[in-house]
Image: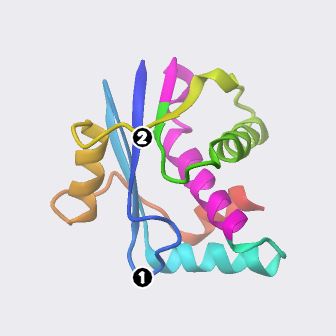
Amino acid sequence: MDIEVDQSIKVENTRRPTVLALSDEVTYALLIPARVKRRALAYLREQGKPAKIATLRVFAAGLFLLLRDFVGSVEQVTIDVEYAGHEADIRSMLLALFRKAGQEIESETITFARIGKRSRAHHLALSVGRGKRPPDQRIKADELLTPLK
């Protein structure tokens, strides 16, 4: 199975929730409330992480939570380019989270590309972000903080 992943509202926008969505043979969307993002970013800043690294780590943790139940059946994951120039960092963080969880995934499985507005993942993320469809999962603070520790 090949899947695409898109984000609606960037992690660093702490006034609105972030939606991460995947689609292909399956569709799945998770919502990270603004207060949960603020708490996670504050935690990482307290640990001495620069703002950009903290943002990338929260994004990677969100991707991990989105993909963890699907990674075993995935041949290719294409993530929309959200943080240009930081794809290698995000891939590395994501692979480390999977390793820590005991799930091995090849580096080549994760790619980054502009997936475009016609993608089902894009439409799903927008639909959930606009409140037209409920998320499949609403992330709580402890769920997001656990992979960040």
In the figure, is residue 84 to the left or right of 86?
left
Of the 4 image quadrants, the one containing the C terminus is: bottom right
Residue 57 part of the magenta-drawn span: yes
Q: Which residues are magenta?
A: 52-77
Q: Amino acid at mark 1?
A: Arg
Figure disc tally: 2
- View extreme (right): residue: 48
In the figure, is residue 102 to the left or right of 111?
right
User: Which residue position is annotated with label 1?
Assistant: 15
Other-residue count near label 1 (Cα within 10 Å), few / some / many at <14 / 14–19 / ≥20: few
Foreground residue among 8 and 131: 8
Task: Name the residue rendered at 71%, 46% in the picture.
Answer: 89
Majority secondary structure in the magenta region? helix
User: Which residue position is annotated with label 2?
Assistant: 5
Foreground residue among 109 and 141: 109
Q: Is residue 78 among what the camera can see?
A: yes
Quadrant in which residue 10 is drawn = bottom left
Measured Cα–Cα span from mark 2 to mark 1 = 22 Å
Pinpoint residue 148: horizontal percent, then vertical percent. Answer: 72, 60
Pinpoint residue 53: horizontal percent, then vertical percent. Answer: 72, 63
Residue 74 part of the magenta-drawn span: yes
